[in-house]
Image (tube, rainbow, N blue to C red):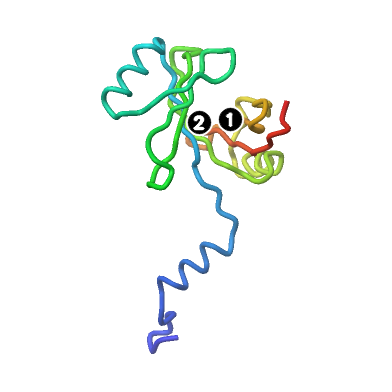
Amino acid sequence: MSESGLPSRPLTSLLSLLTSKIMNRVTHFEIPTGNPEASRKFYGDTFGWTFQKFGDFDYWLINTGPDDQPGIHGGLTKRNHPGQPVTNSIEVPDLDTAIQAVEKNGGTIVVQKMPIPGVGWLAFFKDPDQNIFGIMQSDTAAK
């Protein structure tokens, strides 16, 4: 402690406090589009992103750059309704526990838990300010 009563290394203390709780990170974004072909061309030509078809439906994985550089990858999906927003997904170790925490803290589940075969389990929620996020638990056995 310093003479002021504050920790002598405030940044170290702050980091220690922050990491004492489990922190879940945004690991994926998803862009809805009415025209997947045009959107792939736009993002590819504009930012150099590459796309790989995923599954038997209108969904493409987006590679935004090398894995050893900051950033996350995403997905491009056919828009399901006019107001569908861009969403970010947060990786969690246990989706059922995360769903309970969302509801306990004033959020609302808007898309129930569903499997993404070979990838994991996914649900979507609205936070108290009506922002929509995904929550994802990795599980290659998900069917």
Residue 24 is situated, as x and y percent measured from the top left of the image, at: 55, 48
**141 vs 70: above or below:** above
Q: Residue furthest bottom?
A: 3
**68 vs 133: above or below:** below
Task: Check disc 2 and give the amino acid type.
Answer: Ile
**Residue designated by label 2:** 132
Task: Check disc 1 and give the amino acid type.
Answer: Phe
Q: Disc 1 on helix, strand or loop?
A: strand
- The quarter holding residue 43 reads top left
Left/right of residue 40 with respect to residue 113 in the rendered view: left
**58 vs 95: above or below:** above
Q: Disc 2 on helix, strand or loop?
A: strand
The residue located at (58%, 18%) in the rendering is 55
The residue located at (52%, 35%) in the rendering is 89
Residue 104 is situated, as x and y percent measured from the top left of the image, at: 66, 43
The residue located at (27%, 22%) in the rendering is 45
Residue 94 is situated, as x and y percent measured from the top left of the image, at: 69, 43
Tell which circle, 2 or 1, labels the residue nearer the N-terminal end: 1
The residue located at (48%, 18%) in the rendering is 77
Task: Give the alpha-carbon distance from disc 2 to disc 1, as whole Å.
Answer: 7 Å
**Residue designated by label 1:** 124
The C terminus lies in which quarter of the figure?
top right
Mark 2 touches mark 1? (CB < 8 Å): yes
State the residue in front, 54 or 111.
54
Crowding at dot 2, Cα within 10 Å, few <14 / some 14-19 / many 20+, comes out as many
Q: Residue furthest left?
A: 46
State the residue in front, 8 or 54.
54
- The quarter holding residue 31 reads top left
